[in-house]
Image (cartoon, rainbow, N blue to C red):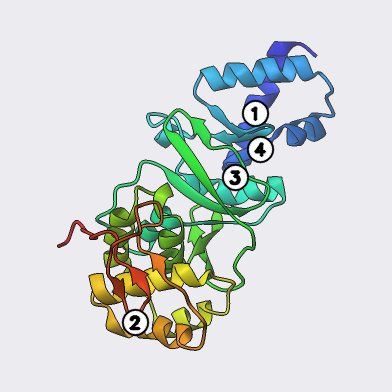
Amino acid sequence: MASENVRNYLEDYIAEIQSGGKLYFTLDDIKNKYRSNYDTAIKFSLNKLFKKGKIVSVYKGFYIIIPPEYQQRKILPVELFIDALFKFLGRPYYLGLSSAAIMHGASHQQVMESYIIINKPPIRTTKVEGLKINYAVKSIMPKYGIEKRKTDTGYINISGAELTAVDLVEYQNRIGGVNRAATVLFELSDSMKKEKLLELLNNDISLSVLQRLGYILDVVLNKKELSAIIKNYLDEKRIFRVALKPDAKKEGYKVHPGWQIIENYKIETDFK
């Protein structure tokens, strides 16, 4: 099969699946469609289409289609293909952290990177032109707090506002530190529901993360009703002193008696 013929077949195939609302395909899809084992010709043709800005590979063997309306950006928004990518990988995931916060109305946030929460094993950061996807790893994926959100190409998994809040504190260093986490939490807290936060506590969440989240909601953001849910839960547990900023010096600072938080950092948000 000549390379030119393969490229023509591929362009026809891309047009066909795009007309059906799909913006992705896999290498196996092509081989199965055309029963072709001409790997060299296929890869050569895919590379030609990539150079023309029609497709991008975001993972080995997985390609996204760039329709005309996105060709100036040279990439699709992550929410249009992330669910298909993880179905291809056969792994659980959810859109989280700042990426989820924006979808919950934290409009002040301008994020140039996307954040996906996964389980082990880890995945390397995805970097292609116009796109960076960071992957944060959880040892146990949450049972509660993950929602389905409709997109133009189907549905994606996204952390609810309450799970997003927990993750912002747990992964604060991945998003720019505790000030950044508190700033996002300030806006996100308007979307948090007490009953959903209570349900979320059935997940396997580190007590130290809950202490820090409760402290920020209570002392920094004055969100007493939300912090009370966490406080009532922690009152039934045995908690120990933990630093507000884990990677900073801990000695010589006051301890907040209610949350058992070593106040080794003064949080400043963009709103205060």
Q: How many residues crowd around disc 4 within 10 Å: few (fewer than 14), some, or many (20 or more)?
A: many
Tag in front: 1 or 4: 4
Q: Earlier in the sequence, mark 2 or mark 4?
A: 4
Which residue is at the front of the view, 120 or 267?
267
**Quick one: 205 or 100, which is closer to the camera?**
205
- Can you tell which mark lies on residue 12? 1
Badge 2 element? loop
Q: Write the residue at 46% across / 80% down.
A: 196
Q: Nearer the viewer, mark 3 or mark 1?
A: 3
| Mark nearer the viewer, 1 or 2 | 2
Three-letter amino acid code of the residue under disc 2: Gly
Q: Pointer 3: residues within 10 angstroms few (<14), some, or many (20+)?
A: some
Q: Is residue 234 left or right of residue 42?
A: left
Residue type marked 1: Asp
Type of amino acid at the residue the image marks with label 4? Phe
Q: Badges 1 and 2: C-beta atoms under 8 Å apart?
A: no
Q: Position of residue 168 (x, y in %)?
A: 41, 60
Residue 42 placement: quadrant: top right
- The answer to whether 266 is drawn above or below residue 133 in the figure is below
Instruction: Look at the image and tell me whether residue 191 can be seen.
Output: no
**Contact? badges 1 and 4 (CB < 8 Å):** no
Check whether the beta carbons of the residues at disc 2 and disc 3 lie within 8 A of each other. Answer: no
Which residue does the numbered mark 3 point to in the structure image? 22
